[in-house]
Amino acid sequence: MELSAKYNPSATEDKWYAYWLKHKFFHSEPDEREPYTIVIPPPNVTGILHMGHVLNNTLNDVLVRKARMDGKNACWVPGTDHASIATENKVVAKLKAEGIEKDDLTREEFLKYAWEWKEKHGGIILSQLRKLGASCDWDRTRFTMDSDLSEAVINTFVYFYRKGYIYRGIRMVNWDPVGHTAVSDEEVVHKDTVSKFYHLRYFISDGQGNPTGKYIIIATTRPETIMADAAVCINPEDERYHWLKGKKVLIPLINKEIPIIEDSYVEMGFGTGCLKVTPAHDVNDYEIGQRHGLPVIDIIDDHGRLNEKAQILVGEDRFEARRKIEGMLKDAGNLEKVEDYTSPVGYSERTNAVIEPRLSMQWFLKMDALAKDALESVESGNVKLIPDKYRNTYRHWMENVRDWCISRQLWWGQRIPAYYLPDGRFVVEPDAEAALEAARKIDPSITEADLRQDEDVLDTWFSSWLWPISVFDPQKPGHPDHKPNKDLAYYYPTNDLVTGPDILFFWVARMIMAGNEFMKDVPFHNVYLTGIVRDKLGRKMSKTLGNSPDPLDLIAKYGADAVRLGMLLCSSAGNDILYDEAQIEQGRNFCNKIWNAYRLIAGWNVDAQAQQPQSAAVAVKWFGYRLDQVLEQVEDHFSKFRISDALMTIYKCFWDDFCAWYLEAVKPAYGAGIDAATYEASRGYFEALLKMIHPVMPFITVELWQVLSDRKDGETIMLLRYPQTGKFDAGFISSFEMACEAVAGIRNIRQQKNISQKEALTLKVKTGFPVSTIPVIEKLANVSVETADSFGETASGVTFMVGTSEMFVPLSGMVNLEEETAKLEAVIAYQEKFLESVRKKLSNAKFVNSAPEKVVALERKKEADSLAKIDAAKASLKALKGE
RNA sequence: GGGAGCUUAGCUCAGUUGGUUUAGAGCGUCUGCCUUACAAGCAGAGGGUCGGGGGUUCGACUCCCUCAGCUCCCACCA
């Protein structure tokens, strides 16, 4: 069989993915094995794959594939999130492009469009995950708006309502004027924003509504809201303004009279010390207003435009109004000055619109009890956050949590199951029928037509917090007493969750709450928090910067395995990842390395007559031990979620140990056959390595495993047991390492002296050097090794050290006396200095007395080794000089 | 404003209860090689006073204090 010198991923990936699907290798059903469960962080149903998904899902897949090969019943549940606000925005935008306004549609009509969009574009991301090799149990794919999952959400709402945790009330909420909905505190991103600080003159009223000549100056960033002012507030301690007490001032432009009030909230040192109080449009002002019984004048509508209550600039967008009112104030003589000012401004995470604090009727879920339990779950270690540093952040959040605003003024999502009677009272029931029944208990004359369901839907996270439960048993949420079905009983709690720290509170904390509430158990035990993928300059990936590559392009160019390896190489938990295409190239190069190792092995012909050369026997023995040693390290890394360390350990084992040393040591001469023992051992090692690499690089390992022997249809490497570590002889391994150092020493000499590898040399080693590995030195360095007590006439030749062993290569006529002398003198100088520092330590009584014996013994060994090296170098020097 | 974290080779990072030589890896760099598995490769080499300063200790990259720089999270100062 002719094999190309390069691995071609595109020829193999789709083929094997189809094979896996055909045989349902990813599918899991409860059985007697130990389960290993991961639920996918459900991507937005309309989302497309980006680098963050690649990182996250590669990590998930590595964990799942490893667990599967560890003999566990691995189940990775995939699915998508309906992402109410994001999806609704996309649908609105799409309709707008077609000339259809959402406002012109009924709820039903809009939802029809939305579902059409979902059917058409939804789930694209799931098919993209297949390109990446994700081993999800696709038969279990769920969507947060599947009818039974939606039911679970409604039941949960009813449950918490009956428990007294859900209430309705007028609150100052974060209004998103682009999404036309309230958003939760967590969905508001504060960013320092450059704006203007307007200093406005508010004239004192003469009591008849006319301005006197006196005025006060008020500093504000939002002059467009002055029409909603209800008072001007000063600090009661502020002597500068005592003369104002009891007076009234006039709002510029509309000349409305408002009182001066006093409240200690006002900082005397900030701004002018006078605060305009606008209860409808600022959280603090609202609270001041409450304390002083001020009216709430809401002058901004759902779209962020001034309404008729503003009296002026009606219909203008708030920012346009700000711009215009500046001129109006100036013309009217009310503008004292304008300064540049930077202040934190809240933005909507979803739409990036500036949040408008606004009073409205919303639904809230009480958080204190839920948060207390969720905090305990993490504090007790029942849920481990990896890395651990997030525990502090988590605690801080949980201890300061506020009630969760769960209603959204949207149509896409689960509609709140509250039904209003004509008189405004309401009932909360799972469906309209039950609602009617309940309503009739209040008023027997109520008919179906009298009941009106709440227009709002629930926050997306109010469905995704049930995800680890509802994907298995949608009956359970909302019914803590319901007996879990077979799946839920088997798979819950899940094992690990891989997600980004940005949704630690949105999602992770709330899943823990829901788990505690409905399952009396946490939803997972380990939360692996990835970093954010950035470009190599450290910038966040974004569409506007254009610095975000399309993962599918990368997969097409380098192969899925290369992309996976590239992402993982630099990803320690919790650290941001600086993405660089060079890492993907490294992944591709590794694929080629594996591929070519296979080409070598596959090209060997067994010679039944051939005896195993000693060099091969030594290498076979060594690599067996080495593999066990590496596996021990790999398992240790995996157990601590040090995925990139595990990966690098395997990478080096394959590239350095296996290819550079093992294969070179056992490789027969060109055209010669290989003995059967070495051949079988090599194939076995190669197969073991394929298994070790498989969780990270599923495609190439499958491709090669399938052709390594005759495989039957339905066989697969992905269900084989991961290699197990065994006892290894560490002493033999270090003897082999000494041999490798000797080889490197000779290669070095060859390079310096320009001696071809083909030219055989003699290597003299002192008695005591481990003889077992000498055949490997002879083969790899092309030398014949002689052992001797002393090197005798060493006048022409080069010495070097391997550890404390002295080595000598006779090279008549090629030795530069000065060079060799200088080298040896440098060694002696270095060692003497080192020896001095060691002896200083050893002569310190405090050190010898208080340091552990082990450490002291080590220092003594250092001393002895250093002495040996100095002696050897001095002897060589003497010989060199012919003394 | 409050809190957390980071600062180790040109780059990205390890460094696991303070002690395996005078600190490691991958990538990049430099030198020599197209040696019949692999030039996307092979062989070799160079590169760091562990951010600055102080302290604790027989011993500090590791613990404490302090200064500087960076990052993230939380936050209603108009």
Image: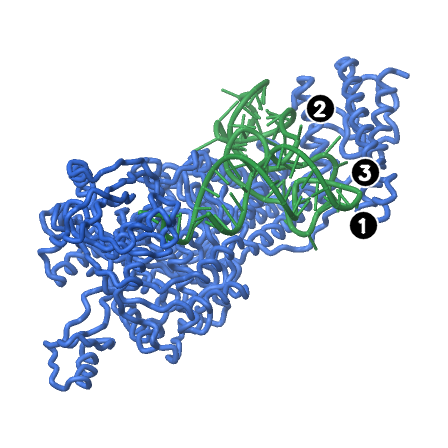
Chain colours: A blue, B green
Pointer 1 chain = A
**Could you say which disc has been placed on residue A760 in the image?**
2
Query: Which is nearer the eye, A285 or A178?
Result: A285
Q: Which residue is mark 1?
A: A852
Is residue A707 visible in this depiction of the protein? no
Side (left or right) of A206 relative to A846: left
Sooner in the amino-acid sequence: mark 1 or mark 2: 2
- Determine whether label 1 and label 2 are within 8 Å by CB: no
Q: Which residue is mark 3?
A: A862
Q: Percent position (x, y) of residue A830?
A: 78, 27
Residue type, mark 3 in image? Lys
Q: Percent position (x, y) of residue A845?
A: 88, 43
State the residue at coordinates (41%, 43%).
A533
**Which structural element holds mark 3?**
helix
CA gap, disc 1 and disc 2: 49 Å
User: In which quarter of the view is residue A197 placed?
Assistant: top left
Vertical placement of B35 versus A647: above or below? above
Query: Which is nearer the eye, A594 or A423?
Result: A423
Sooner in the amino-acid sequence: mark 3 or mark 1: 1
Pointers 2 and 3 within a single chain: yes
